[in-house]
Image (spheres, rainbow, N blue to C red):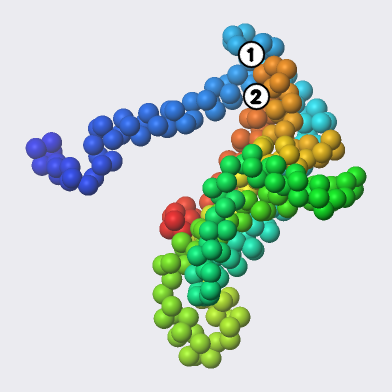
Amino acid sequence: MALLSRRPVAPLEYTRKAWMRLWIAGVMVFLYAPLLVLMVFSFNDSKRNVVWRGFTLKYYEKALNNDGLIEALVNSLTIAALATVFSVVLGAMAGLMLWRFRFPFKGAVEGALSLPIIVPEICMGVAMLIFFAKVQWPVGLPWPLNLSAITIAHITFCFPFVALVVRSRMASFNREQEEAAKDLGASEWATFRDILLPHMKPGLIAGALLAFTLSLDDFVITFFTSGPDTVTFPVKVYSMVRFSVTPEVNAASTILILLTIALTAVALKLQGVKAIADAH
């Protein structure tokens, strides 16, 4: 009787259809199977890393004892953190400006803001290289000032993503709440802090996660703006892969993947998955 009384699948309930579930499963396998293979082979007891020879943790020990690799990882995390903070501030202001105000050449401003998103990274990298060469950006600075060129380049292409997320989030804002707060005597700052900022919060967190991820795994722009003493993790891994893909590279990549997942999980836990999803 339970099978006979089961509610039929509605036309728009795609996730209850067998073909849709198979399609989603295939997409998930396509996206994540390479990462799982990389993580599994990071425990492979073989230098060639092609055939499984047994389980070992020695390559994790080698990766953690590789001073150059650890330095590159610290550089990447530092650049990503700085780029995220500045991108969230600039992106929030740009998103609010485009949402709230009308001004001449607004369309041109929106187009210019979208350029770092649509322009190929190779073009951005070459442009940044020429810019820093023309302004004679100082080199040989102490850490972390020596990372400033890469950080500026990352902020340039990260904050437009934050601006788009914030603006899309503010599209659902009810302006009557802001007007009511002002009618009750709230100042501009109080209205922003108590009305606008809570509504923006999911968009800010989503934008911060996006900026952090984009900065952390960027290679092309970083390759053109980095120097011999400012190697980041992606550039370091690339230099190691040029010779051979060893389990040490897989171990280092696995550590970075787990670190990224942990930071993302913490952010999702603090804000709530549903709230961040609502930002889109």
Quarter that holds the C terminus: bottom left
Q: Name the residue under label 2.
A: 250
Q: Is residue 75 visible?
A: yes
Quarter that holds the N terminus: top left
- Quadrant in the picture for residue 30: top left
Q: Is residue 32 above or below residue 45?
A: below
- At a point 73% along the width and 52% down the height, the residue shown is 152
- At a point 58% along the width and 42% down the height, the residue shown is 120
Looking at the picture, tell me which residue is in the foreground, 143 or 267: 143
Left or right of 255, for residue 267: left
Say which mark, if any, is on residue 98: none
- At a point 47% along the width and 63% down the height, the residue shown is 169
State the image coordinates of residue 24 (x, y, percent, origin top left).
35, 34
Left or right of 95, for residue 218: right
Q: How crowded is mark 1: few (under 14 residues within 10 Å), some or many (20 or more)?
A: some
Q: Can residue 270 be seen in this view?
A: no
State the image coordinates of residue 240 (x, y, percent, origin top left).
73, 23
In this rendering, the count of numbered labels is 2
State the image coordinates of residue 142 (x, y, percent, origin top left).
90, 48
Determine whether label 1 and label 2 are within 8 Å by CB: yes
State the image coordinates of residue 145 (x, y, percent, origin top left).
84, 51
Q: Mark 1 points at which residue?
A: 49
Dot 1: element: loop
Looking at the picture, tell me which residue is in the foreground, 47 or 60: 47
Dot 2: element: helix
Q: Amino acid type of disc 1? A: Asn
- At a point 82% along the width and 38% down the height, the residue shown is 227
Q: Amino acid type of disc 2? A: Asn
Distance from disc 1 to disc 2, alpha carbons, whole Å, reads 9 Å
Q: Is residue 188 above or below residue 168?
A: below
Left or right of 201, for residue 240: right
